[in-house]
Structures are given as C-alpha cells and as structure tokens.
Amino acid sequence: MKNPLTILLLLVTIAGAQQLVIKTNGVAKNYPAADGIEAVAAGNAAVTLSADTDIRLIVELRSPSRIEEQLNGRSFSKTVADRSRRSLRSALPDAEVHQEFETIINAIALTVKRSDVERIAHLPEVRAVHPDLTVSAAPVDASSAPPVVPNSAAAATGAGVRIGVIDTGVDYLHEAFGGRMGSGAVIAGGYDLVNNDPDPMDDNGHGTHVTGIICGNSATLSGAAKDASVFVYKALDQSGNGTTSAVLAAIERAIADSVQILNMSLGTPGGSPDDPLSSAVNRAVRAGIVVVVAAGNTGEYTGISSPGVAPLALTVGAADGPAVASFSSKGPEVSTYGIKPDVVAQGVNILSAKRGGGYVAMSGTSMAAPFVTAWAAGLKQLHPGWSADRIRDAVITNARSLGRSPFMQGHGIADERILSGTVAASPAQLSFGFDPPGTPLWKQQRTVTIANTGPSARTYSFSVMSGAVPGITFRFTPQQFTIPANGTASVTVDLEANNLMLGNNNTFESGYTGTLLAAGGDSITIPYAFIKAPVMQLNFNEVPWTVLVVNTAGYARTIAPKTTGTSFILPDGQYDVVTSFYGSRFVIRENVAVNGRSVLDIASTQAVYPVSFVPVDSTGAVMALGTVKGTHSFIEALVHQPSGVAVVGMGGGKTTAYSNRPKYFSAMSKRFTYGYSMTLQPTNAVSYTYDLVLDSGVTAAKNFVFGKEDLKHVDVKYDLSASVQRAFPVIWTSFTGRHASYSVTFYDGNAEPLRFPFLQQTFHTRRTSTFPIHYQREAYNY
C-alpha cells in the first residue's frame, strides 16, 4: 500500500516511540504509552484511562474514628482502632501503605492490585472502599483589568483565632508574613504532607497567594485576619496536585493544632456529600471547625467539586465586581438537591503575595474562599462562644443578593459587612429536595431559627419574596413574631406543591427556586429550592469507566464519570443502563422505570458471569500472552441493538503487559450484542487476530477455545516502492457503529522493521457473525 509523503514524514518523527493511536470518526490522536493504555468512548470522543493494575484506595474501617465517637458521646478506643488497622494490614501483606488515620476517619490509604479491590470490600473489618482521588488547586488566568487589593479596615482582625490553610504550602519568608514562621509570627506553624517534614515551604505559589489574602500584611496589602495565628499544611505538590489521603492527613493535623477556621481552596471533580473528603469536612464542622471551601472553576451547573459539596462546608463561589464570575462553579448538589455555593466573594484579579517575593494577581474561587475565611475568623474573634454552625449561618445570612439563582450565587455576595451583622437564620437556606412528579400534593416542613445578637428586640413578618408561582404555597407558623435582644425564635415553614399545576423541570439548574422574606427592622432573606422531575440516580461501588443510559424512544447519553455517583433528569419511560468498570466488567440493568426518583445501586461485583477465550498460535499451541513479545491492540463494543448505541472500549500496548483476563457480565438479554477483537503482532513479520461475539444474551459463564483449524492463514505483501528498505506494518482494528466509528492500533517504533520483500504472515479467526468490527492494514516507511 502506497502512502502519501506527508504521512511518511510525520511518522519518521515519532518512529522511536510506543504509542496508542485512536481514530474517532476518522480523526486520529496519539497517546504515548511505555507499556499499555486503555480508553473508553464517551459521546464522540475517546477518554484515555490508566491500564495500571495498581490502584490507590482509602479503606475505611468499621470501628469508629476518634471524632465519630466524640460526637456520639462515647469514649474512643485506640486499642480497637489500632487492632482493626493491624488486621487489615495483615490481610494485605503486599499493599503499599501511604497513610493511616484515626481522628477524622478510621482508615488506611494504600496501593493494591485492582484485582484485590473486591476481596478488600468483603473483609469483615472494612466499612467502605474509596478511590484515593487526585485533588487539585488551579487558579484561572487573571485579566488585564486593575487588580483587587485586599485592604481590610475592619476592627476585627482575627486576633486570638487559629486558622488552618490546606494548600501548596506558603512562602513564609515573604515580607507579607514577616519573613519567618514560628511562635509569635503570623505563620505560626504547619507541616509538609508531600515530603513528610515540618517545613511547609511553597514550591507552587498557589498557597502563598491564598494565605496572603487571609493574613498578609505589608505596605501593599492588608488581609482581614492579619492578627490571627495561621497554620499552613502543604498537601499539594509543586504542580498543585495531591491526593484525597494527603488532604485527610492535613485535616487531622489541623485538628491536632486546634485550628478554629480552615481554608481549603482545592477540590476533586465530582464527589458526593458522602465521599471521604466531604465526610471529613462535615465531621470537622460538627467538632467545632468552620471549614471554608472553594466551589471550583468549571463554570458549569452541578459542577461544584468535593469537598465543596459537603452539606456543612461553607462553600464559596467567585464574584467579578457585582456579578458572578463566569468560571465560578455552580450548583445544585444533585444527590440531595442542596443549594451550593453558599455565598460568593470577589475572586477576579486578586492581588496577593507571590512566591519568592513581590505580588501577583490571580483569579479563581481559590481567591474568593480566603476572603470568607478571614471574615469568619473576625466573627470568631468578636463572638468566641459561637459554634461553627453559627458562624457559617451568620456569613450566609448577611451576604447580599446579586439577584441571581441560588445555584449561581448561593445567598449572595459576602463582604466585610458580615462582621457587623446582628441576625442569623439557621438554616440560612432551605433545600427541600426532590418533588416526586407522581405525587399529586407534595408537602415538606422545615423549622427556621433566627438569632438576634442586637441590643434590642426585633419583630419579623414572614412572606414569599420571589418564586411564587401557581401551585406553590407556603405557610409560616407563626407568621409574625418578636425576638428579644440576644435571643432566638423559631418559625415553622410548610411547603405544599400542587403537582397538577407544576410542570417538570428539564435540567437540574431549572428547578423551582425563590426567596422567603422575614421583613422587619433588619430584614432577612432565605433562598429555597426544590426540583420536580423524573430523576435517575446511580450509585456505584467504584468509579466506573463509562455509563450508557438509553431507551428505544431515541434517548441515549454516555458519560465517563469522575466519581461514584451521578444523576440524570429523564423523560418518563423505561431505560436500559449499561455500566462498564475496569477489567471489562459490564453491569446491565434493563427496563428501569423512571417516573419519579429512581435510585440504582450498581456494583462491579454484579458482573458475575466470566467470558474468556484461549488464543493459539499457527501450530495450535496455547499462547501465554503475558510472556509473548511484541504488541497488541484491542477493541470491544457492547451494542444496544434497538438503538444502535454502543459502549466502546479500546487499548493496546506491549504484549508482555497484557493480561488475558476474562470479561465479566451481569445477566443480559438478546437486546445487547457484545463483540471483542484483539490483534497481536509478536513481530512485524507475523500477526494474529482473534474475534469473539456474544449475540444471544448472557446467563452463564462462557469460554471460547480456539484451535488451529479456527485460524485462517493469509500472507500479506505490502506494495511499497523499490527504494524503501524498511517498513513498519500497522493494523487498524475498527468498530463502526450506527452513530460513531472508532479505530485503534498500537505500534512500537523500536521494534525490528519489516524488510524487503515486505511479506507478513497473518492469522485470523474465521468469522461467523456480522458484528461490525473490521480491519485495515497500512505500512509506513522508517
């Protein structure tokens, strides 16, 4: 096969590398890989995934942590906690242990083989197994507009308050921090969780900038908590990345250092209110620490990262002057339909300390959160007896509305005026959750308590300020009440939704929202939200590789989740759900009815039927693929026949890195067809292709055994110019679906080339199915 010169020249430049190449609808992309890599198709794009056999986990144990016992009024038994961790370590002698925890969570962070995950989950001492996800802090590029300079003139400066900052560390030698760290300095202490030493020196710059907003004090800037004692915990490395386990370790150190306010300008995509980071934040708040978290910078609805989705976190979005910044992540939190963020604060072009000296402007919710942290410290100074919840409620209640959805602004924009607020509502926002569309009259009740810290009594009258539409009715008991000076009063809020009059919401952000008003001498507003829609909520035991939700009425959506839960708003009807996990594990749920809120718990362990194949060489001898030299590539597709939509996976690498593991399926009907094809090139002079197809459903294990007679032998001669001395044969394996096509190959530019006369022996299993996997051969000049 003759090739255009442009292609030959392109491949000459990369001939020495090992690369997986994927074509999506004809557009190729290269993925360098030393040994192997895998990918899944999400929509019309390929998402690469690690093919590593190792995985980092946080294994949570059944025996409670120190804080869990404290919150439940029980004594903590270190002996019991140590025994449970020791038992886990003895059960996993080959695991690499990274961290052990007992204060905020009783758990061990470790690296194990992926094949051990299921066994670990079933150990008697294990409560749950969580992925140890990457946590990041990344600012947004600043604009050319004049910078916003922290220049606090508030009387409350955080004196006597202990603040913790979990970030990339801090350049405590900077003039804004007095040039030192230790007793009597504004940077009172800290720890480096990345290098495991007591010196949290910043090697990135993000943490220095964040800390400067909180407590920096120089001729250039004046942080609102400049008189606080600040402890900085370096949990993120030079690139601004870290792990969930490192952040958990930092939270435990912050607790040991008795911090009262904790800033976390970081996050991991997705997340849930129950993941380890969110749970740790919730427990820290219940133990008395105000935890301020950046919302994230995706700019998307339902885009708030963990631990910003933690219900008790004080989650902060970014404002750009009198508007919400375009990059600021928005709510709601989809598993509970909770209002997030809680507030916004200035987060665009914020000037603060620069690592190594000087000052620099940065943008992001990372810059907004430390403003709120500093003001929370001011409230703690003014009201040392206030609980973490009380401070959080005061910050939210006294933020000023920007007139936007609560999923964009929370309660509104926070500024220094929150320090002079004398009222607070608890809860400061009302998230009513999910209104089942099939319920004619949906009722909810909440109690709101208002605290008055002013010197005189206040009288309030409750009403609906905005969001009043036919079908939504509120009642307040009592509707009018008086709160004495330094006292509290409670009102019962009853919501009735007449679903015969309310349409279904089409997106999570378009739920029913509004504002309640407590009118009086110092009026209070309370945002509320609920959603009326058919919702499918999926919960996974581990992060899946891809999820397909499809029906026969034309609906199809494929995503590659980043966490162990996701939700969809769907039209009423019946759906099939396909979830693929690491190791070609497919869990199929058919005919799932959605007409309200359908919750599915999907576990990789539900794929119980193994499907395997035994490859042979041209003599009929079984090939032990992990010991065969050369390269391989594969493609697999699980096709929903009524719609033609498929879950597609692909990959390739050195054959010595290939594990011929079975594929696993839950029960599935003939509605689905599965095809798999692997191409193996022990050398460039010979290739094997093996196909298998499942087109009659799966209800039991199946093993495909190939014999010599199943292989068809074809000699291929590449038609190359006589001037070519060496060539590299490439075999593309392609799946062509009804809606998209994918092709994959893996080549090793360091392999021995094919030489004149450019003959290649090929062997492939004989086809008995019309499954749409096919092949194309090319040869490239060295």
Image (cartoon, rainbow, N blue to C red):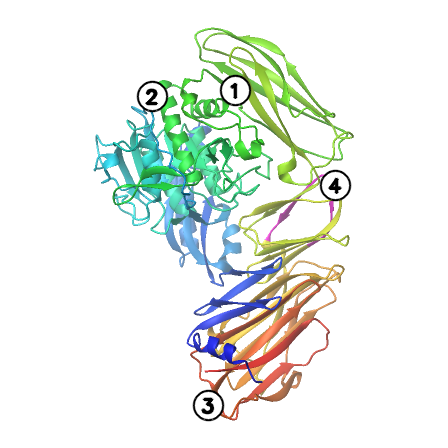
Front residue of 433 and 59: 433
From the image, tell me which residue sits under label 3. 725
Q: Residue at x 57, y 34 (%)?
A: 407
Three-letter amino acid code at the position of disc 4: Asn
Asked whether the beta carbons under mark 4 and mark 2 sit within 8 Å of each other, the answer is: no
Sooner in the amino-acid sequence: mark 1 or mark 4: 1
Q: Position of residue 447 (x, y in %)?
A: 59, 20
Which residue is labeled 2 in the image?
Answer: 156
Of helix, strand and loop, which one carries label 2?
A: loop
Q: Secondary structure at mark 1?
A: strand
- The amino acid pointed to by label 2 is Ala
Image coordinates of residue 106 in percent, x first then y, are 42, 41
| Marks 4 and 2, the one that precedes in the sequence | 2
Residue 131: image tag: none
Residue occupied by mark 4: 595
Nearest to N terminus: mark 2 or mark 3: 2
Q: Earlier in the sequence, mark 4 or mark 3?
A: 4
Q: Quadrant of the N terminus?
A: bottom right
Place residue 731 in its image quadrant.
bottom right
Taking the image as shown, residue 702 lies to the left or right of residue 250, namely right
Asked if residue 596 is among those painted magenta in the image, a careful observer would answer: yes
The numbered mark at residue 425 is: 1
Percent x, y of residue 252:
36, 38
